[in-house]
Image (spheres, grey):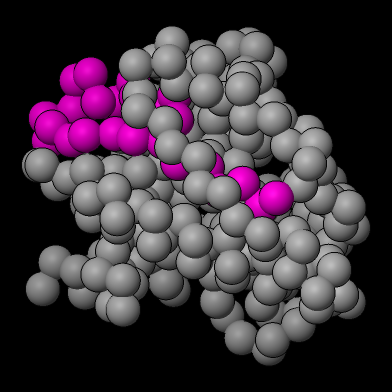
Amino acid sequence: MELKRLLSYTRKAVDDYHLIDPGDKIAVGISGGKDSLTLLYALHGLNRFYPNPFDLIAVSVDLGFEAADFTPVQDLCAKLDIPYHIIHTNIARIVFEDRKEDNPCSLCAKMRKGALNEAVKELGCNKVAYAHHKDDVVETLLLSMIFEGRFHTFKPLTYLDRMQLHVIRPLIYVEEADVIGFKNKMELPVMKSPCPADGYTKREYAKELLQTMNRDHPGTKERLFTAIENQLYRTNALDNDK
């Protein structure tokens, strides 16, 4: 995927759901994976011409795995002239050694997001950008319906009352295949996840299920996303406009 196309999808999401206001200070949560690095490029590119001027920083939460090396991300942020901060934590030890969680992903995600949100507030940001793309949105819907019995997924714009922080998801119109194409074209410095649970999660199950459904019935993913827009996103956007 070309940068121009990525910026087009990103701006459409930003405009459709009013994700960026003049004077925002936005932190991009950087895991080191392809999604977050693509989001960093997208917002960096958008910031050059978007009519609502905003400041941009990048923040990574170091979970405490010895194998984690953020040097390539540091180099990329320096290249793009984006301030970069690493938040060091003991989340890996707590989840895998102290708690010995059978389902570590849920607790890890909760603690990681908590550490990220607290850090970006301390850094003076009023918004934090997560790198969830279209496939993530639909996969989360499937997980919610299968394991929780409800029609739910994350929204383009969420306000965290306790933190007084807005969460934005500018990549919701971008498909994972396009993210992979962008990563390959730009040779993004993707970090290999050191997590021992990587690749063995319920999300991987939902990803494989969605791929099977879309292969057997082409267009399934797009129809599911349309259902999400009709039931959740458009209603939310109208409520925000009132």
* 36 to 132, vertically: above or below: above
Residue at image position (61%, 22%) is 71
Direction from residue 21 to residue 14 in the image, left or right: right
Direction from residue 168 to residue 220 in the image, left or right: right
Residue 146, quarter of picture: bottom right
Q: Position of residue 58 (x, y in %)?
A: 41, 36
Region of the chain picked out in magenta, as a range: 40-64
Q: Position of residue 36 (x, y in %)?
A: 54, 37
Q: Position of residue 4 (x, y in %)?
A: 41, 16
Confirm whether residue 222 shows in the render.
no
Outermost residue on the bottom side: it is 149
Residue 46 within the segment the image draws in magenta: yes
Count the marks: how many? 0
Residue at image position (31%, 71%) is 163
Direction from residue 145 to residue 129 in the image, left or right: left
Pick whichever, 83 or 207, lies toward us: 83
Pick whichever, 26 or 51, lies toward us: 26
Pick whichever, 235 or 2, lies toward us: 2
Q: Position of residue 191 (x, y in %)?
A: 71, 30
Residue at image position (61%, 46%) is 62
